[in-house]
Amino acid sequence: MEEARIPHRMCTACGKRRIKEELFCFTVEAGCVVFAASGHNGRSAYLCRDKNCIGKALKKGSLSKSLKAQMTPEFLEKLSEIVENAG
Ligand SMILES: [Zn+2]
């Protein structure tokens, strides 16, 4: 019963639905994809805290597509770092 009230979000890479705590949240700032601050408003996209999903999203550009925004080199670097550290 309790579980039904927890909002689930869909991972852009694998399409699985998870609770927010298990996902990275991204949003758009000045036309670029950024990590969303907690409590932000507006368009958002999610990725599992999983290097496979992040890697997949990097390769396919799924974040850019779903947010209709660009991924800056800085942002890509940050994501790659996360992938490496998760490995
Ligand atoms: Zn995923």
Image (cartoon, rainbow, N blue to C red):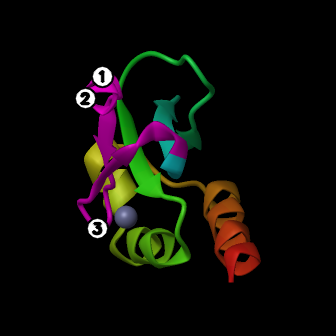
Can see residue 32?
A: no
What amino acid type should be assigned to the residue bearing mark 3?
Cys
Tell me where residue 6 appears, x and y as whole percent. Answer: 35, 28
Task: Tell me if mark 2 has few (under 14), some (14-19) or many (20+) residues whose alpha carbon lies within 10 angstroms of its own.
Answer: few
Residue at 43% in and 55% down: 47
Vertical side of 28 occupied by 77: above or below: below
Left/right placement of residue 87 relative to residue 34 reads right
Please determine whether, in this image, residue 70 is positioned above or below residue 42.
Answer: below
| Occupied quadrant, residue 82 | bottom right
Distance from Cα at disc 2 to Cα at disc 3: 22 Å
User: Which residue is label 1 attached to?
Assistant: 5
Q: Is residue 4 magenta?
A: yes
Residue 71: percent from left, percent from top: 51, 55
Boundaries of the magenta span? 1-21
Badge 2 vs badge 1, beta-carbon distance below 8 Å: yes
Q: Please give left or right for residue 67 compared with residue 58 in the image.
A: left
